[in-house]
Image: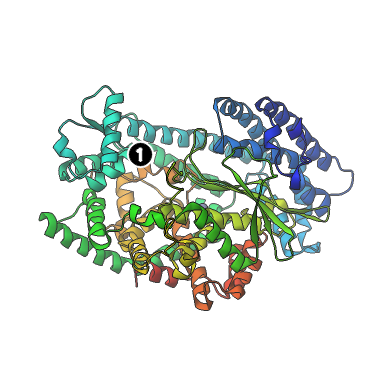
């Protein structure tokens, strides 16, 4: 079987998609896990004393076969799946979890790692090696490896309870989302709503055997409703329904779950020797500690608040003029924002799309990468692919050496999940003295071509392409020794810098001239459209910023220190006092359905959305200073950021690139807040 090994006898050792049969996967997983286990055993049973090479490096390169198999399988399970494949995923996921638990709880392995780590100061290691050693050690110690048996048991108990609480929290939010719908029977009540949304609501009603139209709290249904429906009472009903999820004193209420999750996270952090949950989380972030995050959020708040207040007054005046409303409420925000936006910009997608033909946009991204980093993209037809729509490219440097293999997969189809993402089939690393180049892929769901028109992108799709392409560059230009530090394997408040910074080129006339050409006439996009795109991108940005900051501050208030929470709503209201701009709604509570931080992995991490924006704006400001195609800035970016992966602390890498720490000025300027 082809996928039992990690070398495939294909061009560049690319994944042998066409030769894999579904039934190959499960036995291959079982056998590759056995191989990986044997590699770990060999490290443990090495009769020689633990060294950096025989323990840390050996561990980092172990499981290569399994990693390649997993990347092929799980990438395809996202991009080209079917029922049978999902069934296999269900079967192998627990086996993989068990295997990774076996490693992370392996005492003998940890003893060897600790033995190397204990001599750290006496070893001659370069920066990357030191980072690798710390990373491996922390991977165990943050999981309790240094605790005595009693405390280990406590930690497991906390983890088990936390896992259950997060699950329940999520189930409650889901149940409350599903338990509500708004049933409309009078068509006049839907005045203002676009046809597409109305049609969707009609079919939803039909599926429930109801007359008329049905709206739910799912985003694709909810958002158009509160943005476009003229009937203010109905918008109010819908907004309040969304805001009181899991806050209704019924069986799905999350108030007690919030309290318990916060309490257990704090206990867990203390047990592991940290001051708070935020201290624990931020140790492995660019921001490093809660104080830094707090001051980051407060600093932005201070600067964005006056702009937000001005916008609020503008919006209020507009609502007053239009409908005689004196006090705008939460259910008016999206509605009047959209109306005002249309009045000021009248920009619609159909007007712009002819200028954004997919092939031209993609070539534009390639040209920009060539101008900046000296790499070229050559489409090739002799690399195996998993679907006929996939394109394959050789990425070459100036000396014609292979930099990477690049796959693109752009259109929606059955079997592909929603959204857009970058991933890789093979990571970069130096193995036995050979710099093995990565195989990187971007997968999107763009507007497909029709029989009469090529694929024409919305502007949002254009920035999405550049965003994923930026992640891809991070993967493709990787140049590290160890696989676990390569490419996008960086702290997660740093990982969006390469992607978001690339989006900036989409707003620059000099860059747009390369690719924003009318698909029929070849005419370059008119300057007035470019201006409007820019202005509308920062429209009401103050209010939006305040909203993001309010979530970040709430998150940090819960997790930054020990908290005794009597009343969740009161606690939340106090935490968000300084960031609120709309009047409070008594029957609503954010915390009971804030799944990002209480169910998902964003606790003490919500700030990173804004953090990443500050970084990308600050980095791009450097390009603007020296010219957006400046080779000098680009090569600094490549040398210190793109190629370095997670080999050094992000702040150190960033300062080497930029010459100074990032500051928020560029973002505030770009967002029109100063
Ligand atoms: Zn991203």
Q: Quadrant of the N terminus?
A: top right
Residue 456 in the figure: left or right of residue 214 = right
Q: Which residue is mark 1?
A: 255
Q: Nearer the viewer, residue 414 or 672?
A: 414
Quarter of the picture holding the C terminus: bottom left
**Residue shown at 52%/33% (left/top)?**
415
Q: Along the horizontal axis of the image, is 596 left or right of 227?
A: right
What is the count of numbered marks?
1
Residue in the image at 18% along x and 54% along y = 328
x%, y% of residue 119?
79, 58
Left or right, 510 with respect to 271, comes to left
Q: Answer yes or no: is residue 552 visible.
A: no
Residue 347 lies in what quarter of the image? Answer: bottom left
Eyeballing the image, is 613 above or below 41?
below
- Is 632 placed above or below 451 here? below
Residue at horizontal 64 percent and vertical 40 percent from the top? 385
Q: Residue furthest left?
A: 324
The image quadrant of residue 396 is: bottom right
Estimate the x, y position of residue 519 in percent, counting from the top left: 44, 56
The residue closer to the viewer here, 631 or 666, is 631
Residue 391 showing in the rendered view: yes
Q: Position of residue 501 (x, y in %)?
A: 51, 63
């Amino acid at each position: 079987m082809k996928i039992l090994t990690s070398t495939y006898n294909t061009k560049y050792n690319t994944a042998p998609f066409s030769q894999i049969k579904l039934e190959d996967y499960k036995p291959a997983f079982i056998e590759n896990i056995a191989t990986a286990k044997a590699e770990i055993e060999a490290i443990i049973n090495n009769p020689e004393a633990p060294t950096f090479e025989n323990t840390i490096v050996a561990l980092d390169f172990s499981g290569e076969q399994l990693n390649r198999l997993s990347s092929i399988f799980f990438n395809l399970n996202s991009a080209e799946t079917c029922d049978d494949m999902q069934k296999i995923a269900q079967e192998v996921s627990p086996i993989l979890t068990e295997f990774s638990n076996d490693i992370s709880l392996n005492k003998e392995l940890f003893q060897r790692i600790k033995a190397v780590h204990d001599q750290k100061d006496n070893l001659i290691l370069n920066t990357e090696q030191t980072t690798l050693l710390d990373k491996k050690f922390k991977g165990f110690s943050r999981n309790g490896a240094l605790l005595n048996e009693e405390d280990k048991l406590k930690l497991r108990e906390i983890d088990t309870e936390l896992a259950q609480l997060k699950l329940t929290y999520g189930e409650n939010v889901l149940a409350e989302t599903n338990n509500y719908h708004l049933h409309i029977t009078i068509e006049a009540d839907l005045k203002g709503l676009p046809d597409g949304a109305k049609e969707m609501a009609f079919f939803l009603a039909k599926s429930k055997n109801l007359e008329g139209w049905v709206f739910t709290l799912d985003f694709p249904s909810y958002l158009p409703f509160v943005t476009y429906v003229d009937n203010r009472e109905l918008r109010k009903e819908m907004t309040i329904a969304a805001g009181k999820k899991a806050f209704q004193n019924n069986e799905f209420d999350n108030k007690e779950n919030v309290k318990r999750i916060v309490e257990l996270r704090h206990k867990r952090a203390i047990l592991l020797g940290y001051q708070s949950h935020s201290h624990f989380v931020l140790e492995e972030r660019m921001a490093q500690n809660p104080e830094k995050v707090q001051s980051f959020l407060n600093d932005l708040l201070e600067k964005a608040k006056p702009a937000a207040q001005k916008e609020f007054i503008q919006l209020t005046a507009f609502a007053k003029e239009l409908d005689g409303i004196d006090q705008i409420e939460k259910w008016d925000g999206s509605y009047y924002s959209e109306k005002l936006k249309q009045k000021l910009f009248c920009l619609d997608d159909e007007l712009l799309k002819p200028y954004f033909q997919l092939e031209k946009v993609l070539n534009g991204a390639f040209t920009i990468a060539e101008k900046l980093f000296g790499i070229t993209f050559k489409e090739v037809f002799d690399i195996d692919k998993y679907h006929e729509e996939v394109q394959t490219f050789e990425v070459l440097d100036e000396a014609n050496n292979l930099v990477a293999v690049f796959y693109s997969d752009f259109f929606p189809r059955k079997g592909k999940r929603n959204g857009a993402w970058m991933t890789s089939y093979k990571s970069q690393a130096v193995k036995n003295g050979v710099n093995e180049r990565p195989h990187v892929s971007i997968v999107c769901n763009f507007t497909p071509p029709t029989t009469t028109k090529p694929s024409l992108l919305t502007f949002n799709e254009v920035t999405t392409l550049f965003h994923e392409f930026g992640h891809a560059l991070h993967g493709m230009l990787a140049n590290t020794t160890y696989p676990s530090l390569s490419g996008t394997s960086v702290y997660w408040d740093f990982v969006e810098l390469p992607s978001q910074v690339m989006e900036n080129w989409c707003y620059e006339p000099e860059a747009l001239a390369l690719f924003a050409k009318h698909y029929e006439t070849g005419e370059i996009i008119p300057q007035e459209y470019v201006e409007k795109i820019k202005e509308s991108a920062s429209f009401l940005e103050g209010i939006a910023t305040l909203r993001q900051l309010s979530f970040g501050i709430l998150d940090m208030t819960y997790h930054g220190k020990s908290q005794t929470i009597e009343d969740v709503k009161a606690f939340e209201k106090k935490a968000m006092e300084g960031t609120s701009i709309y009047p409070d709604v008594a029957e609503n509570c954010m915390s009971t359905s804030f799944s990002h931080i209480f169910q998902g992995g964003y606790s003490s991490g919500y700030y990173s959305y804004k953090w990443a924006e500050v970084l990308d704006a600050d980095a791009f400001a450097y390009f603007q200073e020296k010219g957006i195609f400046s080779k000098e800035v680009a090569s600094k970016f490549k040398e210190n950021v793109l190629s370095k992966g997670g080999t050094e602390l992000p702040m150190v890498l960033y300062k080497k690139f930029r010459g100074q720490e990032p500051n928020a000025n560029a973002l505030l300027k770009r967002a029109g807040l100063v």
